[in-house]
Amino acid sequence: MSDSELFLGGQDWDTVSSRTSADTLVINMGPQHPSTHGVLRMVLELDGETIVNAHSVIGYLHTGIEKTTEVRTWTQGVTLVTRMDYLSPLFNEAGYCLAVERLLGVEAPERAQAIRVLLMELNRIASHLVWIATTGMELGALSLMLYGFRERELILDIFEHITGLRMNHAFIRPGGISTDLPEGSVEKIREFLDYVPARFDEYETLLTENPTWIDRNKGIGVLPADVALGLGVTGPLLRAAGVAQDLRKTQPYCGYEQYDFDVPVATEADCLARYHVRMAEMRESVKIARQVLDTLPGGPVMVTDPKIAWPAQLKLGNDGLGNSLDYIRSIMGESMEALIHHFKLVTEGFSVPAGEVYVPVESPRGELGFHVVSSGDNKPWRVHTRDPSFINLQAMPYMVRGQLIADVIAAVASIDPVMGGVDR
Amino acid sequence: MDEKLAVFVAEARERFPLAVSEPVEEFGQTSVDVGRDGLSDVAGFLRDEVPFELLADWSCVDYFGIEPPERRFMCAAHLASVRFPERLRLRVWIPEGDERCPSLTALWPAANFMEREIFDFFGITFDGHPDLRRIFMPEDWQGHPQRKDYPLGGVNVQYKNGAFIPPPNLRVPPEATTGYPGRTA
């Protein structure tokens, strides 16, 4: 593979078409093609039905989240980063908070860590369910679209019950999580975990032996391990190429080392292998979530240091979740200092020691890294996100070259890019 | 620092004594400063002879107002491996007025998008990059938005072909009419 073949970026229309030979046809796919997962635009150079070259044009969803974090406090940063990769918001929050905690030199209490793991694994299932739903839809298995979103809805209900929001939760905070599990959560999650494996069986009954599914996926979008490593590809794509790279095993965080789970690996490195890896990962996530519920430790969910811990003391009242009346009485009626402290911490936030850290977590799409730099101020100096969708998308031209135009859909679907994460 | 990582860093320092600095341990993470001219050689050595086959991240920080102008930008490459759990950060300091850095695309094709992102947001030119263009901002955008001296507001909103609308505080308000839009009399 020559350099020029590897580096096909997003030239615009006239520059692309002037470079191609008269025998090929350049067509534009997206940014609003239904199968391109949001606003991904692809420019394909075709020789008949065969892809000669392809490249992706991105940036349509760029919202400057990294820049905005620099003018907000460290706690407000959570609200911003959760909006990056909107299918796995809890991973964004957890990665960011782990980085801030590393800078602060604090560690969230055991119970908060366990709840983070629980939420992340449920989120992984939800994200993979969207993947199977959209991939099924794009490859003609429309029932999968309905089934995947149906089961994901149950997880979103659980998230709404616990965090108050279906997406963009801002629930994980530097130092712990914003509030403890509300009553009935454990039962709700157990009910879901007992229900969902049978649904996975149902998907596999529909797909695994399905000749159309196999035809559309087998041998398509092959990305061998050496190319994947060179292109920085991680997550299910790399594991489907036979490399058992999973940060939950190699660099455990949030106490993942306590839980017993396998890292599913396949060796074929094609779209079908990625399907098998993702299905197996969902079952592993169910396994981890069950173990978390069985061993859920008690205790606080936020560090005790009053200089960091969010001062609110939430309680569920008749009119919903809010500050507990005892706490309001204390700060409004009894302690002027407590009121000043509350006000300062909420408006000004806390300061973080100067320095830089890079903290990766294993998101459903691969390594999600946060390079966080502090200048010692109450606002981050720089927050850079290494989003796996952004990096993995570079593999698209390699995966589709020489294949048919219909295979582009299967290959892009198997990368599972989320444009909110790509463009940030 | 992990013992094996210490050995790798010592080897790199022995091999490139002028380019690689003393390792710095901060928050449990190891970084070395690498001279701009020696970056390609050092990175090539780390990729081929010690196990860092993965370029995990390649990002940039603008230390405007914190560091002196000759150390204004810092590009950080985070190297990782699938065979070895430790990571290493290479830091390249880039002076103001000469924003150039050797490209890592020849070693890790993954650097392609990462360097385009840094170029787009910080205006650092990567020598040897095959296709260095903006990646997120429109191709005719003026300025590099993640620089610390890029204005945070009060500037024209840019559109294609040089068109713009003034910032909100300078816009001429629609003719003060009668209370709410649509009402005529």
Image: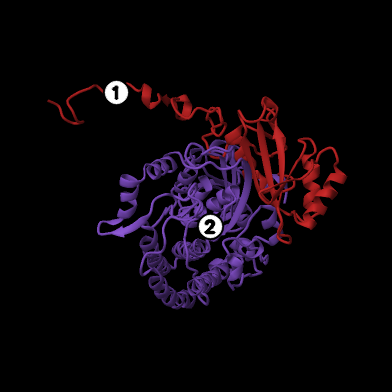
Chain colours: A purple, B red
Quadrant (top left, top right, bottom left, bottom right) of the C terminus of chain B: top left
Q: Is residue A338 visible?
A: yes
Q: How many labels does the image show?
A: 2
Chain assignment, label 1: B
Residue that lies at the very extreme toward the left in this rendered image: B185
The correct choice, above or below, for A196 with respect to A245 in the image is: below
Amino acid type, label 1: Pro
B155 relative position to A314: left or right: right
Q: Residue furthest toward the front? A: A334
**Callout 2: few (<14), some (14-19), or many (20+) C-alpha neighbours within 10 Å?**
many
The residue at 27%/24% (across/down) is B174
- Direction from residue B26 to residue A109 in the image, left or right: left
What is the number of the mark on residue B173? 1
Residue assigned mark 2: A108
Q: Which of A415 and B70 is in front in this view?
A: B70
- Work out whether residue B26 or residue B85 is closer to the camera in this orientation and state it: B26
Question: Can you give x and y, in whole percent of width and height, for residue A34 in the image?
Answer: 43, 54
Pinpoint residue A62: horizontal percent, then vertical percent. Answer: 49, 42
Q: Can residue A19 be seen in this view?
A: no
CA gap between label 2 and label 1 equals 50 Å
The residue sitting at the right extreme is B14
Please tell me whether mark 1 sits on a helix, a strand or a loop. loop
SS class of the residue under badge 2?
Answer: loop
Q: Which of marks 2 and 1 is in front?
A: 2
Residue at point 62%, 58% (across, down): A234
Residue A189: quarter of image:
bottom left
Both marks 2 and 1 on one chain: no
Q: Are marks 2 and 1 in contact (CB under 8 Å)?
A: no
- Above or below, A256 against A96 in this view is below
Q: Residue A417 carries which label?
A: none
- Amino acid beneath label 2: Ala
